[in-house]
Image (cartoon, grey):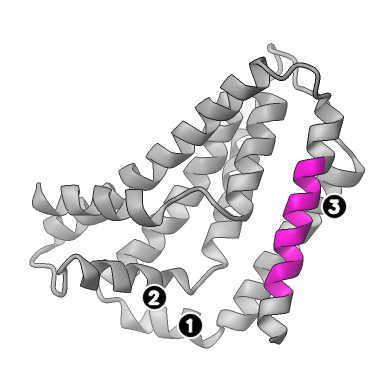
Amino acid sequence: MEYLLRGILIGLLFGLPFGAVGALTVQRTWSSGVKAGLLTGFGSSVADCAYACIGAFGLTLISDFLLRFQGIITALGGVLILAMGLKTMLCPQKELPQEEPLEGGKLFLTSFAIGITNPAAILTFLFAFSYFGISEIAGWINGILLVAGVFLGTYFWWGALSTFTQFVKRRAAKFQLHTMNRIFGGILCAFGISVFIKLFL
């Protein structure tokens, strides 16, 4: 249980909902409800778990490959973020009726793709493990508990962000949906552009 608790703490400290996925979670919660936000956050948490697995189990072959092609993978993520931002900003979505089912797979996959195209996350988790004194993990069970803790810690933030966004939405009825979508679309575009600026610099 010690590894589970450490994983939760790492997820809480390093899984703060900032960045492109955070903006996407807020936008989708605002337009389609808490469930859409939770599905979006779920994709990001799974991506975090994938990188946490690489760090926890010492999968150096995979980590070396991802870090070697980090620029290309990150650029693909930047293109995805920019495309989603432009689509949201230029073609504001209408709010989904209550009876219309959400495209859960699409919500999950897009946020997962954004999260997984950040190979530098491996270094973040390696630093986190070292900071919390997790240099070597004895046994697969402890590794699984650590990764599960990371998932729970990061997903807590997505749940909190989605719930808070829904709370604010109910008290901000004067803001029209298409206006908010344009704002969030602009934020996503800014994140996408910043990815390319970092790559070129």
Distance between the alpha carbons at the discs numbered 1 and 2: 9 Å
Q: Residue furthest top?
A: 99
Q: Which residues are magenta?
A: 183-196
Image side of residue 69 versus residue 157, left or right: right
Instruction: Give the labeled residue for mark 2.
Output: 123
SS label for mark 1: helix
Residue 20, quarter of picture? bottom right
Query: Of helix, strand and loop, which one carries label 2?
Result: helix
Q: Residue at x 78, y 23 (%)?
A: 95
Q: Is residue 158 left or right of residue 92?
A: left
Q: Is residue 59 left or right of residue 65?
A: left
Other-residue count near label 2 (Cα within 10 Å), few / some / many at <14 / 14–19 / ≥20: some
On residue 67, the disc is: 1
Q: Is residue 27 above or below residue 197?
A: above
Q: Position of residue 16 (x, y in %)?
A: 45, 50
Residue ID for mark 3: 86
Magenta segment main secondary structure: helix
x and y percentages locating residue 21 in the rendered image: 59, 50
Q: Depth check: give the residue in front, 124 or 35.
A: 124
Please report the residue visible at 51 percent of the width from the left and 35 percent of the height from the top. Answer: 161
Q: Quadrant of the C terminus?
A: bottom right
